[in-house]
Image: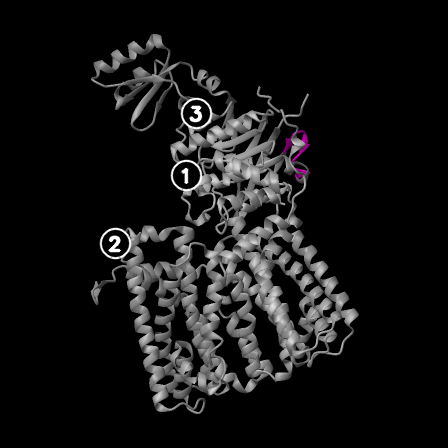
Amino acid sequence: MTFLGLRWEGTRAFGATEMRVQLHEGLAIATSMIVQVVLLVFVLVLDRSILPYALVGAVVYSVFMLGQRLQNEAAYIRIDHKLTDLYFASPLSAEAYFLGMSAGVLVAYLPPILVLAAVLVVVVHLSLLAVGTLLFVGVAVWFFTCSFGYIISTQFKDNRAIWPYASLITNFFGVLPPVFYPLALLPGYWHPLALLLPTSAAVILIEAAQGGLVAVSGSGLALAAVALSAEAVVAFALAIVWARRSARER
Amino acid sequence: MPAEALVARNVAKSYRLRRGLTVDALRGVSLTVHPGERFALLGRNGAGKTTFLRIASTLLVPTSGTVEVFGRDAIADPVAVRSLLAVVPQEGKPFFHLTPREQVYAYLSARGFDRATARARTDEALGQMGLLEVADRLSTTLSGGQRQRTVVATVIATEAPLLFLDEPTIGMDPFARREVWESFRRLSRKGCTILLTTHYLDEAESLSEHLAIIERGRLLTQGTAEGLKQQVGGTLRVSVPDGARIRSELETFGQVVDDGEKLHVVVGPERVQEILALAAREKLQPTVGPVTLEEAFLRAVGRSIDAEG
Amino acid sequence: MANRSARPPASTPNRGSVLPAFGLIGWRWVSRNPASAVAPILLPFVFLYFLRLIAPPEYFPLEIVGAMLFTTQNIGSWVLGDSASWRIETRMQDVFVASPLTKSRYLIGIALSNLIPAAPALLVLGALLAYVVAVPLLGWAVLVGAILVLWILFSAIGVAVSSRVKSQREIWPVGNLTFTVLGMLSPLYYPLTILPPAWQVVARFLPTTYAALLVQGTLHLPGAVPSDPWLDGALLLLLAAVGTAVALRMYRWREGD
């Protein structure tokens, strides 16, 4: 099976394998929600009025965290198990390996995200348009975060060295920008940056689709949508190129 | 009279699995290692070598039995003997973020050596392991064999009176293995006692003064390599490829071992001509060689050291 | 029979030493992975920034102290990671066990090697605290004391948990669960009194709560709960001593103990 000149055979089989691997780690799946819960607790304790924003942010952040999970998994398979060599020396293409792993992680970690999304729908009374937007931005953030995480994972030789970078990336994309708090709390001169960052752009688009949560001009929303889409596509393309290159280098 | 370096009596270890099942990893192993001796525990994968070594080196508590290190009880009071021993664990790796020089120095410091001694011993151990050229390179950039030698250097640098080495040359090339063997002999000359596990027959034969064969948690036989070979009952091994059709005749010469490709029989020089004649009649092409430790192992265990299961 | 025992067995040191070995291990970790020191500096500020946006501004000094205690507590999570990795992956723990280094000295060593990457963060946060409030000498002493107690306690919890982890893959979720939850249950970033009553009861069982109350009270920070610093200090020491003792007992140094 080829598409866009790339070979995708084996993606489904490898994705299913990876999903089974992930499902063996119930604790990791359960604890993938900890930071979101902690930040929601902060909000509940300190300023309950921004709960709708924090809930939207928690869902987007959870999708973003899939990339971090993939980053750890890809590094672990390569460094500890040394299975990457085995896969790359097989008919499984580098692009199928990357996409299969991304899909496997997504399926395994989807249940808690869906629970959180259900809470969001119920608490915020999310409109149909907002739900549709959530789906669209969710897919875009997933493409971006998995691609980003995979590329980062190839840069390390020691698993321990990845963790500090992982937490920096998570916080740079997930906690600093207006993901868990309203855009209005951020000084105006940072707003363009917030519209450009994939996580905050995704949150702002959902909030705008819901109506009444965020005041951003039409051009601002267009910028966020274009930026998010472009980042997802470019990151995905880069990850494919990177996966193929690192496979060849081996 | 000085105490023995290691005395193990009836050491047993069972692991409890789910559903009440138990696995007996060791079933009453007894052995004595004399001071200054190089002693090899030889066995197949899963035979119980590592379990015994971990118990003797205070890393694992046995289910029953006693272990004494230089006359002190290593089970009841492990702290008392730990300054007298050091261990190369199986598949050990150096710290990824240190260089070999830092790795060895850090460990010697942790064991309480002063700075000058630690530095001198570090250089000496790295030199013996052929690592001086890469001594200041990060461990992550070293080959698998160099990493293994770094771990061995870390431990031999202690010159502890009793050294436990669990498969110490695994992953090394033949040249490096010989260098490592020589360093073990040097340590032995300095008075260190060495207990190593291995499934390399050449390593056991070349390095050890005393060896014991272990299988399914039991110590089957022990002695010197020559002594074990003599127990085989002959000095020459005749190997007959595709020899199934003359098996019954071969069995009249002695115990026949089938490795799947050849039949092997051990005889004295006086009977070799008879077997060669028998094989020639059947147009088979046998080979003749001296008895090795492999025959001793086959005789003791009933299967090759590389056989699985 | 070989008998070359020229050297008496007692010629090797019979007492391990922590500072030079684990100082080197910790320092090299930071010097070769600068992000390992940068991340702990930035992380509390990310939280502080978030809290600054959503919390009353008068709580800021209290949140800085909370960030210092949270950073200290997080050392336990890194200790867990190192200890598990050294046991499962590199097997260096075996090499240390079969040496004169005792279990408690190994704990101090591994805790020290992980204090090094946290130290810059603690210093920066301390400087920020001094900038936003006047801290008396006694206040600094109490703060440093509380940090030392939590450092040992959570490092002990880290090694104890690490000895029960079966695979490297469990390190991240187990550490995340243990240390984040313990950190969040205590009133580090907010006054105890604004928490729901049931939560307050649970928090009263945690040593970090008393560390926070002690420091907040000693420094008279806005939002501090009126309490007896002697009692808070005593409860902190008591809970930390019990916690450390239990953790050390749980910690499997020799397999099968």
Q: Position of residue B300 (x, y in %)?
A: 45, 24
The answer to whether the residue labelled 1 contacts the one labelled 2, judged by CB atoms less than 8 Å apart, is: no
Number of callouts: 3
* Helix, strand or loop for disc 3: helix
Report whether residue A38 is seen: no
Q: Quadrant of residue C49?
A: bottom right
Report whether residue B128 is seen: yes
The chain under label 1 reads B
- Badge 1 amino acid: Gly
Determine which residue is flagged by label 2. A91
The answer to whether the residue labelled 3 contacts the one labelled 1, judged by CB atoms less than 8 Å apart, is: no
Q: Quadrant of residue C183?
A: bottom right
- Badge 3 amino acid: Phe
- Badge 2 amino acid: Pro
Q: As drawn, is A232 to the left or to the right of A5?
A: right
Numbered label attached to residue B297? 3
Numbered label attached to residue B171? 1
Q: CA distance from mark 3 to mark 1?
A: 23 Å
Q: Is residue B71 magenta?
A: yes
